[in-house]
Image (cartoon, helix red, strand yellow):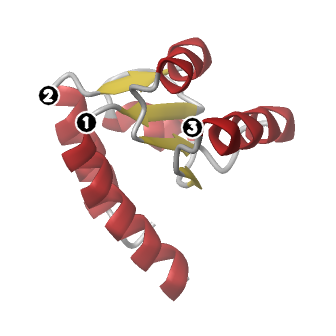
Amino acid sequence: MPNDKIMSTLSLAQKAGQVKSGEFAVEKAVKEGSACLVIVAQDASENTKKKMKNMTDYYEVPLYFYSDKEKLGRQIGKEYRSMAAVTHPGFADSMEKQLKLYFTTE
């Protein structure tokens, strides 16, 4: 991934206590309305991707498929993570701007 601003922002959000990771915690954050942005690893299972796509569409939460499980986990100080939800609007906005740039230049 040439653009690591996304991952460094995720890391900062984690240090600030503004990230939920793992399927159960992310689902809960989306359903409760605290998730501002969801990132699902590109190497997550198709079933996981589809489930989160449907859920984030329903709850109107931005969703991006980015990075892989190992890098996603490492950025937040965990083992492998297939998904993470950012719960702070400022961090989420900053990451979304970078993600949109990444996906339009890819």
Q: Quadrant of the C terminus?
A: bottom right
Q: Quadrant of residue 64?
A: bottom right
Q: Mark 1 or mark 2: name the one nearer the start of the chain.
A: 2
- Closer mark to the observer between disc 1 and disc 3: 1
Amino acid tagged 1: His
Residue 81 percent coordinates (x, y): 53, 28
Q: Mark 1 or mark 3: name the one nearer the start of the chain.
A: 3
Element type at mark 2 = loop
Amino acid tagged 3: Lys
Residue 53 percent coordinates (x, y): 72, 43
Amino acid tagged 2: Ala
| Distance in Å between CA atoms under marks 2 and 3 | 21 Å
Residue 52 percent coordinates (x, y): 70, 35
Q: Which residue is mark 2?
A: 16
Element type at mark 3 = helix
Q: Is the residue 98 above or below the residue 35 in the image? A: below
- Do labels 1 and 2 touch, CB within 8 Å? yes
Q: Residue at x 70, y 33 (%)?
A: 55
Give the class, few, some or many, for how many residues have Cα within 10 Å of label 2's Cα (few <14, many ≥20). few
Looking at the image, residue 46 sits to the left or right of residue 33; the answer is right
Q: Nearer the viewer, residue 66 or 90?
A: 90
Element type at mark 1 = loop
- Closer mark to the observer between disc 1 and disc 2: 1
Q: Residue at x 44, y 33 (%)?
A: 85
| Distance in Å between CA atoms under marks 1 and 2 | 9 Å
Q: Which residue is mark 1?
A: 88
Q: Which residue is mark 3?
A: 69
Residue 17 percent coordinates (x, y): 20, 22
Looking at the image, residue 68 sits to the left or right of residue 37; the answer is right
